[in-house]
Amino acid sequence: MESRNPATGELVKRYDELSERELDAKLALARRAFERHRRTSFADRSKPMSRAGELLERDKRRLGALMTLEMGKTLKAAVAEAEKCAWVCRHYAEHAERYLADEVVETAARKSFVRCLPIGPVLAVMPWNFPFWQVFRFVAPGLMAGNVGLLKHASNVPQCALAIEALLREAGFDEGVFQTLLIGSGAVSGVIADPRVEAVTLTGSEGAGASVGAAAGRALKKSVLELGGSDPFIVMPSADVEKAAKTAVTARCINNGQSCIAAKRFIVHEAVYGEFEQRFVEGMRALKVGDPMADATDVGPLATPQVRDDVAAQVEASVAAGAKVLCGGARLPGPGNFYAPTALAEIPEGSPAYRDELFGPVASLFRVKGLDEAIRLANDSTFGLGSSVWTRDEAEQRRFIDELEAGQTFVNAMVASDPRLPFGGVKRSGYGRELAEVGIREFVNLKTVWVA
Ligand code: NAP
């Protein structure tokens, strides 16, 4: 496993994968740790979880620099990510007990109620794009629910994976309550099948989701899948176009364009298309691409040469099919995996920029004649993760809320995750939800109790 700086291509550190014997010892430890951890009270768990939040705040610059070094997000975004992780720790430290409280139900019984009990070790297979946030949004509810965590992180962020384990130990969680497994993706189905593991959650691509979902199905274990997206960002005539265009640039280029909920398809009413396109392209051209450690940088490198090659190939194929390049459209010269912020228009149906997820700073612009066409085009995707709509017309807002096929619709705002709100998708963006009350309830035994 290699930690390689995406801004320079330099190899920073190399790790060996766990041997079979080492992996077996970690799974055994997880089981033993669970037998203790499941018996702790919410107050017992809340203390180290709050402490984890404090450590994330205290060490945010060091941890942020590690994220930037391994996957190239800007340092300011990485520091903000550590802060957001602290928020999710505080959120569940405070609310887990209420989220999982007994629910009394009146029946013919003397007493009947529903109790949420921990289920055991849960495997988390996580991506590199938000190397701390993706893990903490699983860890905070998971450990507070009384489960223990096993992390198989993406192979290019091993230092982040190990830093998270160290931080949770320092926060006061017992040995084995959270462990990082340095294993390749080939070892994942074996871990899922292992009787000591109870469930699996994956955030990643469709291919990885299908493979993990199939392994969970074979083992008859619960799974949650958070997969890709090609989120629509719809602008209607009543919108504040200036604000929409400015937000659109941020929403597309967040995390150097590598976010599942980045706005990817910009669907704009013809009455405001001209103004939107001009402002959006100006905004994309003004972004400063460069050293992710520098304060002034807006967009850093893509995480790996493969990610950049994939984006470049998707743009080339779309242009070959007839798409027009409004700005960017090419790799940037020099070392590192840099790609120019790009906007494409006149995109033919069936080309990658119409159909696929583009995991880099590349926007697809579409012009539509009205509301029905906007909804039809937005839903003409295999994905259904987020959606952002810009309109001041309440009837239009209602139509979007009811008819967009997505796990979330944000009105006059960009899509963002929030510990207080459920997060997840429909269609090929996966199933299950993270965060909020519903997120902590995904991996519990919701036990019905009847006392005659
Ligand atoms: P990825 O290649 O699918 O990798 C994600 C994780 O799955 C990594 O730990 C990877 O391990 C592992 N993996 C890959 N193939 C596997 C397989 N066949 N069996 C078991 N595990 C496997 O995704 P990525 O490139 O890191 O992340 C980008 C994707 O994640 C995008 O599609 C993005 O939209 C999606 N994403 C979704 C959300 C969401 O909340 N819905 C959030 C962030 C990202 P290795 O690194 O060892 O291959």
Image (spheres, helix red, strand yellow):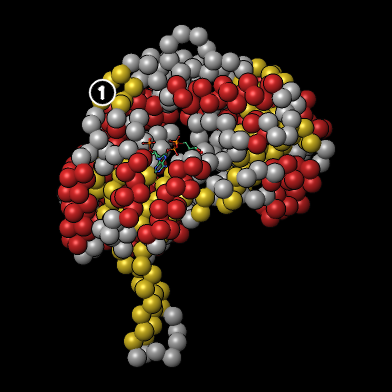
**Which residue sits at x=44%, y=47%?**
211
* Residue 360 placement (x, y as % from top left): 53, 27
Asked if residue 37 is positioned above or below residue 306 in the image, the reply reads below
Mark 1 = which residue?
13
| Residue 172 visible within the image | no
Residue 236 occupies quadrant:
top right
Asked if residue 322 is positioned above or below residue 433 in the image, the reply reads above
Q: Is mark 1 on a helix, strand or loop?
A: strand
**Which residue sits at x=82%, y=32%?**
271
Left or right? Give the position of 435 relative to 399: left
User: Callout 1, which amino acid?
Assistant: Lys
**Which residue sits at x=67%, y=50%?**
404
Residue 291 occupies quadrant:
top left
User: Within 10 Å of the Cα at label 1, are there few (<14), some (14-19), or many (20+) other Cα atoms?
Assistant: few
Residue 252 occupies quadrant:
top right
* Residue 358 placement (x, y as % from top left): 57, 31
| Residue 104 visible within the image | yes
**Which residue sits at x=21%, y=65%?**
39
Asked if residue 163 is positioned above or below residue 118 in the image, the reply reads above
Quadrant of the rendering where the C terminus is positioned: bottom left
* Residue 400 placement (x, y as % from top left): 70, 49
Left or right? Give the position of 142 relative to 31: right
Q: How many marks are shown on the rendered structure?
A: 1
Quadrant of the rendering where the N terminus is positioned: top left
Q: Which of these two is toward me, 37 or 288?
A: 37
| Ligand 1 neighbours mark 1 (CB distance < 8 Å) | no
* Residue 106 placement (x, y as % from top left): 45, 84
Left or right? Give the position of 133 relative to 382: left
The quadrant of the rendered image in which ligand 1 is seen is: top left
